[in-house]
Amino acid sequence: MESGFAEVNGVSLSFIREGSGEPVVYVHGNTGSSAWFQLVMDLPGCSAVALDMPNFGLSSPLDGDISIQRYAAYVAGFMDLQGLKEAVVVGHSLGGCIVQALALDRPDLVKAMVLVDSGAPDGLLTPRDRYPAIEFMRTSRTVLEQALKAVAPTLKDEALFGALVDDAQKMAVPAWIGNAEALSNFDVSARCAEYQGQVLVIRGTFDPIITDEMAQETARAYPHARLVTLEGVGHSVIVENPALFLQIFGNFLAEHGICKR
């Protein structure tokens, strides 16, 4: 697996890449990094790329305001720099909102979307009375571990889990509250009908964050979308059951003639 850095508008972005063929771009969620996708990079017929967003992992922090649209602009800049046109773009959790913003602003870059336990087109509200708990999570590894276990309840690989916690602790200080506010302020619901690409919405039944109603709302919002519900999986099938994700994703790609083996 190749790793490297790319500079986009003065911000250094870390990424990993595997394979060759049609492009697949993975966009991680809150407290995440490219490490969340390391078990789903092997896609025959595809070149899979996963990046650390600004403020996350090994990438540089951002100055100024944090918004979903701003994150999406950095993904677009990265894709332009890497020549990743007409890609299948996969977004997990907060990353799903980023991918939706990207697809609507730059449809030339996004051939199809896969939204894994994603925030809905009208965002994900975090009540302000939850902000102290977010700050506590930032400063206490034990609390952070408890929070990540809740979003990946069936993950049994302790080494991988420890690596994900390590990366979560690298998130830039302003992003802990800033990401919550960005999700609360996000709303592209009035524009969803503009996107004509295929959309696959995936949700685990054990997900404590994204409800079935939210997932259905997302699937209804896009003209060519469908929802797949996974029994016995939490918020993060990409690490909880990567083989199942690869099966579902591979079938989606094959159905639409993408990444032919």
Image (tube, rainbow, N blue to C red):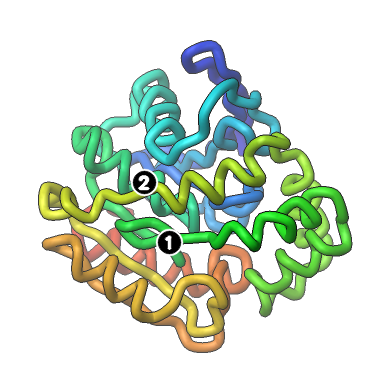
Residue picked out by circle 1: 118
The quadrant of the image that shows the C terminus is bottom left
Q: Provide residue 249's location: percent of width, then percent of height.
A: 38, 64
**Could you tell whether 100 is left or right of 82 in the image?**
left
217 left or right, relative to 208:
left
Secondary structure type for disc 1 = loop
Looking at the image, residue 1 sits to the left or right of residue 253; the answer is right
Mark 1 / mark 2, whichever is N-terminal: 2
Residue at image location 43% in from the left, 74% down from the top: 203
**Rendered residue at 82%/67% (across/down):** 158
Image position, residue 9 (x, y; %): 47, 13
Looking at numbered disc 1 in the image, what kind of residue is underneath it? Answer: Ser
Residue 118 drawn at (x, y percent): 42, 61
Residue 260 located left or right of residue 29:
left
Figure label count: 2
Q: Position of residue 7 (x, y in %)?
A: 54, 15
Q: In the image shown, does 213 or 4 lie closer to the viewer?
A: 213
User: Picture quarter containing residue 69?
Assistant: top left
Give the crowd class for mark 2: few <14, some 14-19, many >=20 residues within 10 Å.
many
Residue type, numbered disc 2: Val
Q: Extreme front residue here?
A: 129
In whole angstroms, how far apart are the C-alphas of marks 1 and 2? 9 Å
Name the residue at the bottom extreme: 231
Q: Quarter of the image containing the N terminus?
A: top right
Depicted 19 relative to depicted 133: above or below: above
Q: Secondary structure at mark 2?
A: helix
Residue beneath label 2, please? 99
Query: Mark 2 and mark 1 in contact (Cβ < 8 Å)?
Result: yes
- The residue drawn where x is 47% and y is 60% is 125
